[in-house]
C-alpha cells in the first residue's frame, strides 16, 4: 500500500508563499504542462495557477493536497479531523473529492455528517480492544443507542430486529447506487484523461506552429506569402481545436463533480 497523510493544518503541508503551480511542480516533479493538466483535474483553472497558496480558500487548499496525494498514487489515506477549520462549502468540496477516492480511507473525526457520508466500516476502542462494525456510521450509532437503551420486553427486541433488517436493506441499496455512480464517474474520468492527453498534444502542436510562424515572419525567414498564410491557417485551426477541447473539458469536469 502507498500511504498518504492529509493534514488538517494546511500550513503544515503547503508552502503558502509559493504560487499554486510553483508548489505543485516542486512537490510532484512534473513539468509545467503535465502539472497544469493534473491541477485541471482538481478543478483549478489557468487563472488559479499563479495565485499564491495563501489566497486559496480552505476547500481549494484541500483540493490541492488531494491533487498531490493522487499524483503520488496513494491508495491508503489517513485523515485526522480533516474538517476542522473548514467552512461548510469547503467541507462539502472535501467530501466530494474523498467520495471519488478509489483507495482506503482511515478517518478520525467528530463530524458525524462527514462520517455518515463516507464511512462503511467503524472501528471502536472498547475495553482496550478494537471492535469492528461493518456498516455505515449511522447504522453503528443507531445500534449503539439501541443496545444502551434496550429493555427486557420481547416486543422491543422484535422491533429492533426489524429496524436492523430495514437498515441493512437500505444500506445495501445505497451501496449499489454508490457503485453505479462510481462506474459512471470512472467512465467520465477516463474520457477526461483522454481529453487531457489530446489537449497536451494540441498545445505542443500550437507551440511548434508559433515557432514556424515567428521564423516565417522574421527578417531571416524565407517562407513565401502563401506558405506563411498556410501556417497561419494551421495555427488558427489548432487554436480553435484547443478552445473546443477546453470547453469539452469543462463540461466533463463539471459532470465529474
Image (cartoon, helix red, strand yellow):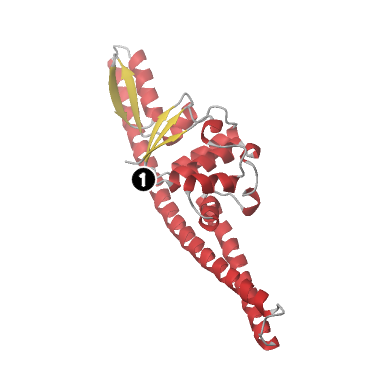
Location of residue 7 with respect to 37 vertically, above or below: above
Name, please, the residue furthest toward the front. 220
Residue 107 point in image, percent of width and height: 41, 30
* Residue located 28% across and 23% down the image: 131
Residue at the image position 35 percent from the left and 41 percent from the top: 2
Dot 1 falls on a residue whose secondary structure is: helix
Indicate the quadrant containing the N terminus: top left, top right, bottom left or bottom right: top left
Left of 190 or right of it: where is 31?
right
Count of numbered labels shown in the rendering = 1
Q: Residue at x 62, y 44 (%)?
A: 19
Image side of residue 135 versus residue 206, left or right: left
Q: Give the percent coordinates (x, y) of residue 121.
A: 34, 32
Q: Residues within 10 Å of mark 1 (few under 14, many from 20)?
A: few
Residue 190 in percent (x, y) is at: 43, 58
Q: Where's residue 32, x and y in %?
A: 55, 55
The answer to whether residue 160 is left or right of residue 65 is: left
Q: Nearer the viewer, residue 19 or 162?
A: 19
Per the image, the residue denoted by label 1 is 176
Name the residue nearer the viewer: 140 or 192. 192
Q: Is residue 182 above or below residue 227?
A: above
Query: Which residue is at a point 63% across and 37% down the rendered structure image?
Result: 54
Outermost top residue: 152
As rendered, which of 138 and 54 lies closer to the eye?
Answer: 54
Q: Is residue 181 above or below residue 108?
A: below
- Near-viewer residue (63 or 15): 15
In which quadrant of the rendered view does residue 243 lie?
bottom right
Residue 100 appears in view: no
- Residue 137 in sight in this render: yes
Amino acid at each position: 500500500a502507498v500511504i498518504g497523510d492529509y493534514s488538517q493544518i494546511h500550513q503544515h503541508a503547503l508552502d503558502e508563499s509559493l504560487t499554486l503551480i510553483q508548489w505543485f511542480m516542486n512537490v510532484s516533479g512534473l513539468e509545467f504542462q503535465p502539472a497544469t493538466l493534473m491541477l485541471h483535474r482538481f478543478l483549478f483553472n489557468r487563472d488559479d495557477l499563479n495565485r499564491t497558496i495563501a489566497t486559496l480558500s480552505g476547500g481549494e487548499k484541500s483540493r490541492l493536497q488531494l491533487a498531490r496525494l493522487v499524483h503520488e498514487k496513494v491508495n491508503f489515506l489517513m485523515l485526522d479531523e480533516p474538517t476542522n477549520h473548514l467552512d461548510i462549502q469547503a467541507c462539502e468540496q472535501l467530501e466530494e473529492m474523498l467520495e471519488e477516492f478509489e483507495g482506503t480511507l482511515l478517518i478520525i473525526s467528530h463530524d458525524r455528517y462527514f462520517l455518515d457520508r463516507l464511512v462503511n466500516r467503524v472501528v471502536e476502542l472498547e475495553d482496550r480492544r478494537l471492535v469492528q462494525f461493518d456498516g455505515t456510521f449511522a447504522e453503528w450509532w443507531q445500534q449503539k443507542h439501541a443496545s444502551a437503551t434496550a429493555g427486557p420486553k420481547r416486543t422491543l427486541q422484535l422491533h429492533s430486529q426489524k429496524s436492523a433488517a430495514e437498515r441493512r436493506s437500505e444500506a445495501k441499496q445505497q451501496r449499489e447506487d454508490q457503485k453505479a455512480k462510481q462506474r459512471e464517474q470512472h467512465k467520465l474520468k477516463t474520457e477526461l484523461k483522454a481529453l487531457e492527453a489530446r489537449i497536451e498534444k494540441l498545445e505542443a502542436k500550437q507551440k511548434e506552429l508559433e515557432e514556424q510562424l515567428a521564423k516565417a515572419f522574421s527578417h531571416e525567414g524565407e517562407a513565401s506569402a502563401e506558405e506563411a498564410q498556410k501556417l497561419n491557417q494551421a495555427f488558427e485551426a489548432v487554436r480553435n481545436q484547443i478552445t473546443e477541447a477546453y470547453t469539452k473539458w469543462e463540461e466533463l469536469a463539471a459532470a465529474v463533480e
